[in-house]
Image (cartoon, coloured by chain):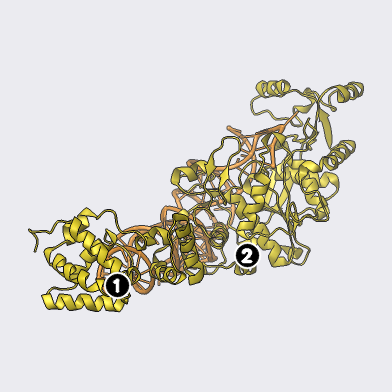
Amino acid sequence: MKFVPLGSALCMNVRVRFAPSPTGALHIGGVRTALYNFLLARQTGGTMILRIEDTDQNRYVPGAEEYILQSLAWAGIKIDEGVGPGGPHAPYRQSERKAIYQKHARELVDLGHAYYAFDTEADLEAMRQRTPNAQYDSTTRLQMKNSLSLPKEEVQKLLTSEPYVIRLKIPSNEEIHLNDLIRGEVKVHSSQLDDKVLMKSDGMPTYHLANVVDDFLMQISHVIRGEEWLPSAPHHVLLYRFFGWSNVMPRFAHLPLLLKPDGNGKLSKRDADRMGFPIFPLTWTDPRTGETSKGFRESGYLPEAMINFLALLGWNPGTTQEIFSLNELIQSFSLERVGKAGAKFDIQKAQWFNQQYLRALSPEILSGYLLDSLKKEGFACTPDRALKIVAALKDRVTYPQDFWEQGRLFFAAPDAFDSSAVGKKWTSDAVKVLHEYEQKVKSAPALSANDAKLMLEEICAAMGIKPGQVLAALRISLTGGMSGPDLMQTIEILGGMETALRIQTALKQLAVPTSNV
RNA sequence: GGUCCGUUCGUCUAGGGGUUAGGACACCAGAUUUUCAUUCUGGUAACACGGGUUCGAUUCCCGUACGGACUACCA
């Protein structure tokens, strides 16, 4: 019962759609929904369609559509048909398909499955006040102002003089079945359903009408969308039936939600802000408030890592494999293995994926990241030296920008010394060695890591001091602190001159300890 | 409130009538390392609860609890 077979779906012409609303930036959960659609399309040789559901003019946000397109492109989710590439079912923007919905809505009225309603907002409010939990349905519709309750002549008159909506006439007493690919059999009694508005008074359709009409006309085979649509899915099933399209109704798959990392509930921008991680794929500036939200891309997340992470948030391959290229995902993905429960968004796991993917990149690409940062910061660096720095830093980074964050020590001497480290490690023995070492290193501008090591050992041996006791002090004088890449490697990259210079500075600035010998 | 959906380590999850309940992230410890990081090894840690069904339930059924979604002329 939990594995609902796709049946002939694999053989049929798979056409899936991602249908966002341009009301703002694309939420990361939307990216996952798009991804699952895309994976199924690619796996079956089907078609991935992008449709823009912009039927609410009040919520339209300029730039949102372009943002969605760019986000999907960044994520590597290619659109085969729809807004962007175009296609045989154009237009793919619902605001441009008004007439189509009008026609279908009227058809439903003629069939007796929908009706005109003239209730004002106040009328609706009054109805809700009258009875608790009241909804516009078979028990209340006759008390309202609509073409079912009013005389014909009056309806005709109102139709020309008053604003009106078209509502779906829900049958009063029947069980509606829905076979969800993820949830299995879902049953809802029609008495629980309300007479949803199909056409708004501004002449635009609601989601319910538009999405059913378009999915039919665009020959969508699978509707893969968020769980928040499950409660209205029975309405959609009814619409397919009333239009006479039941035999070509798409298969439904309602995806579990992405939850906030702590507590419960849908992952929101607020949660992300509060916990300090992005929620949008790309940086987004809200045109109304002017508020800017940093995207995953700008925060240093690689699209391949995000995709891998997102794919595993709700889906699993049934094996222990964790790292998946896009092609591997396309191979392995299946709706059967999508879980039912919501998944908490674990940014730490995303970071781990990013680290894995970052390390797997070629030295050339990695050094490119460093070079880019250096350019911005106004530092010059040869490609060769960048390569060396990147090699020294490779196992220490999570994001591309870490190469600069951690590599800046190669370009700027420390401006302060970690006082607790100094207190513990800045010994008079170390200072003695450092004086000698500085002299020696100064005359060897191009020394190798190995040379640097030999020189140090030589001095230490001559003075009868263990090198281990000096290394920390040496590190402090070069980097200001106690952590960093391999010390000798650091010296090699810094060069003898710079190394000597930094030791001199440290020797000058840090008091020679008298107490600890 | 009503309807619908859900519930295995802290997190993502595998599993499934009899298992030492497996993996990954995170965390902790040890080893390696001149530091930190990496790497390696090991460890802590889970079947929400109550009834059935059954020789046996974490697994099947029913309840309860908890959580979530929906409940607009928004999508």
The extreme front residue here reads A443
Residue at position x 69%, y 47% from top?
A187
The quarter of the image holding the C terminus of chain A is bottom left
Give percent across and percent down for residue B29.
Answer: 26, 64
Residue at position x 68%, y 46% from top?
A65
A345 w.r.t. A359: above or below: above
The label nearer to you, 2 versus 1, is 1
Would residue A366 be visible to someone looking at this image?
Answer: yes
Chain of the residue where label 2 is placed in the rendered structure = A
User: Callout 1, which amino acid?
Assistant: Met
Query: Residue A21 versus residue B13: which sits nearer the camera?
Result: A21
B3 w.r.t. B61: above or below: above
Give percent across and percent down for residue A318.
Answer: 56, 67
Q: Which chain is orange?
A: B
Query: Residue A150 versus residue B64: which sits nearer the camera?
Result: A150
Q: Which is nearer the N-term, disc 2 or disc 1? A: 2
The picture's colour for chain A is: yellow
Give percent across and percent down for residue B34.
Answer: 25, 70
Numbered circle sitting on residue A488: 1
